[in-house]
Image: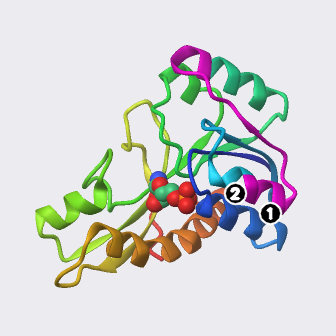
Amino acid sequence: MRVAILISGGGSNMEALVRAMHKGAVPAEPVLVAANRADAGGLAKAAALGVPHCAVTGKGAALEADLIAALDAVRPDLVCLAGFMRVLSADFVARWPMLNIHPSLLPLFPGLDTHARALAAGVCVHGATVHEVTPALDAGPILGQATVPVRPGDTPEALAERLLPLEHQLYPAVLSRWIAGARGPFLL
Ligand code: GRF
């Protein structure tokens, strides 16, 4: 199973996926980390992990064309989005099986600023979701979720800090189940 990972930022979820593959917890090989920003911190992490990596920095159709070229060159069986902050077209999404991690308990809070919106909504439980990517944003079939409590006085930053370590467990666990053929709900 050849896995490519798309990132935009720090790449901590990418790192968790790669480490799980390297230690055999996920039976897959990381074949490429591609970032849509040259300054994505995750590119240095990919280098340190010894994973081929590149920055693909165009916009819109050019971004997708360049990403397709980079991905086709490594023949992935699966593409994992890990903090990739660009919406992809239906044509792009149809090219490979694709998973995403989203920092909310979908179907609540699709889109941006999930932690602030969860706090504004007054929910007591928040979390993250790994789902299959479909053309509709953050709306593909749910494969797994992890939850955290919301505490009095929480800020978006505090919630993110509480949740991120669970994301790092959730994504590899769901990927491993997905490779084994499991598609049902999984609660970390
Ligand atoms: C994570 O919270 C992820 O759920 C969201 O963006 C953040 C990326 O963090 N999609 P990192 O780049 O993996 O550190």
In the picture shown, does residue 142 fall above or below 56?
A: below
Please state which of residues 142 and 85 is positioned toward the viewer in this rendering: 85
Please state which of residues 43 and 183 is positioned toward the viewer in this rendering: 43
Magenta-colored span:
44-63
Answer yes or no: do the residues labelled 2 and 1 have beta carbons within 8 Å? yes
In the image, residue 62 lies in the stretch drawn in magenta: yes
Q: What type is the residue that disc 2 sits on?
A: Ile
Q: Secondary structure at mark 1?
A: loop
- Which residue, given by chain and number where applicable, does mark 2 sit on? 179
Query: Which residue is painted at 61% across and 63% down in the image?
Result: 12
- Who comes first in sequence, dot 2 or dot 1? 1
Residue 51 percent across, percent down from the top left: 84, 53
Residue 40 percent across, percent down from the top left: 62, 47
Q: What type is the residue that disc 1 sits on?
A: Pro
Instruction: Specify the quadrant of the image occupied by residue 98.
Output: top right
In the image, residue 188 lies in the stretch drawn in magenta: no
Instruction: Specify the quadrant of the image occupied by residue 123.
Output: bottom left
Query: Which residue is painted at 46% across and 35% down in the image?
Result: 134
Within-10-Å neighbours for mark 1: few <14, some 14–19, many 20+: some
Left or right relative to 29: residue 42: left
Could you say which disc has been placed on residue 27 in the image?
1
Within-10-Å neighbours for mark 2: few <14, some 14–19, many 20+: some
Residue 89 percent across, percent down from the top left: 49, 23
Residue 82 percent across, percent down from the top left: 57, 52
Please state which of residues 2 and 123 is positioned toward the viewer in this rendering: 123
Query: Which residue is painted at 76% across and 69% down in the image?
Result: 19
Left or right relative to 24: residue 153: left
